[in-house]
Image (cartoon, rainbow, N blue to C red):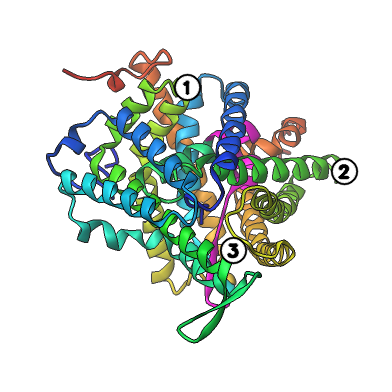
Amino acid sequence: MGAGHGHRLHFHAHSPVHRAPAHLKVLALLGFMLVVVATPREAYAVFVVEALVLLGVIGVSRVPLGYLLPRMVVEVPFAVFAVLMPFISHGPRTEVLGVSVSEPGLVAGIALLVKGSIGVLASLTLAATTEPQDLLRGLQRLRMPELVVQIMGFMIRYLDVVTAELGRMMTALRSRGCDPRSPRHWPVLARSLGALFIRSYERGERVHLAMLSRGYDGKLPQLEKTP
Amino acid sequence: MHVPDGFLDAPTSVATGAVAAAAVAVSLRGARRELDDRTAPMAGLVATFVFAAQMINFPVGAGTSGHLMGGALAAVLVGPWTAVLCLSVVLLVQALLMADGGITALGTNITLIGIVTVAVGWAVFVVLRRVLPKRLDLVAPAAAVGALASVPVAALVFTGLFAIGGNAPVDLGAVVTAMLGWHTVIGMGEAVITGLVVASVVAARPDLVHGARPLVAERELVTRKVVPQ
């Protein structure tokens, strides 16, 4: 069930990066990415240094690059936009491999691609080295409102339960000749989603009652660090 | 699909982060009114539902697909404050645990997907609910129109942010046209699915639909005698 260890991106290993407190990792990621985002777009030497720092952290974390790189497909839509940039931008033209492209567009496209890639790789590193419970504890230490941390905790806990429920519904639809992607079958798909909402909502009510019967008073005990 | 790191410059990202933090703080108070002490588990499960619903892709044309944003849907189903919280938490989990959407762009993503779609969807829905006849079967069409409006407006706000802090020398008129055209198509998909989902929940459990509560409350419980044969 959803309360197990790790999550889909978590890579089990023992390294200083895995052991580092989650709140420091989140702060480090945020600070690092703000520096990357604020780097001038033509400071290529700085980009190289930033990429090397990130690769160094990944090296220490012992998460193989072969594990992280395929998971970078998340950024594909924006990579496409970055690649299109030299062609759709205005400004002085320049020749690259015999194709006329916009020079400022080329610079912006490369910067976008580099910053986006560093961002995705850095976020993946955090996700791969941090257990959800540690992340919640870290956010708590960063003074994130208690209620937001609790909502996030419930979401993480029931993520696999609810998505698996949706998956079973989709399997049932497909086995009856439905294609959930096709607009022709949207009414059926929507009824399934409606049912999923009712089930999720009622599960929430049951969880709340179960918590009350165990003495819930607005605080979650298991988030406090167990010795 | 979320805004990644580096798409908008640092000052814009920090500013939208501040907007997002303020909106979440206000929503925390509002959600307590909507859900009282059930807030944490209920909002958590609804956030999970929104996440699951966002996994459904639909074809938009030209080989690409869009997915449900769910802002208007969540607003009508659980109320606007809880909806802002749910979508913000979904985006937070996606940024921190799934590398979907950059951490510096989290404020931008929460502002666009969490706040603008919910606010626009809910506002349009409430206006329509007031104007239209007070009938339960009109809740779903009103929700659909709210969803239809919410997506292009979010795209427009994104274009505004892009004009302020965009990192690309692209002609702004072209961006507006492309974003609006594209997102109107996505908005239609969003509208149809939102309307159908709301209709199905209204049919089965009208008491759960936050946007239908005033209408459900007006319905009287009628007890009739069985006429003896």
Answer left or right for A78 relative to B188: left
Please, what is the three-letter code of the amino acid marked with disc 1?
Pro
Taking the view exactly as shown, the residue that stands out farthest to the left is A14
| Gap in angstroms between the C-alphas marked 3 and 2 | 27 Å
In the shown orientation, is residue A30 left or right of residue B184? left
Boundaries of the magenta span: B62-85
Q: Secondary structure at mark 2?
A: helix
- Residue type pointed to by label 2: Val
The answer to whether tags 3 and 2 share a subunit is no
The residue beneath circle 2 is: B131
- Circle 1 sits on which residue? A145
Q: Is residue B1 left or right of residue A9?
A: right
What is the three-letter code of the residue carrying label 3? Pro
Quarter of the image for the C terminus of chain A: give it. Answer: top left
Q: Which mark is residue A121?
A: none
Residue at mark 3: A187
Residue shown at 28% from the left, 48% from the top? A54
Tell us which disc is closer to us: 1 or 2: 1
What's the distance in space between the residues labelled 3 and 1, CA to CA?
Answer: 39 Å
Give the CA separation, mark 1 to mark 2: 38 Å
Q: Quadrant of residue A67?
A: bottom left
Whether residue A214 appears in this view of the structure is yes
In the rendered image, the vertical position of residue B69 relative to residue A130, given as above or below: below
Badge 3 sits on which subunit?
A
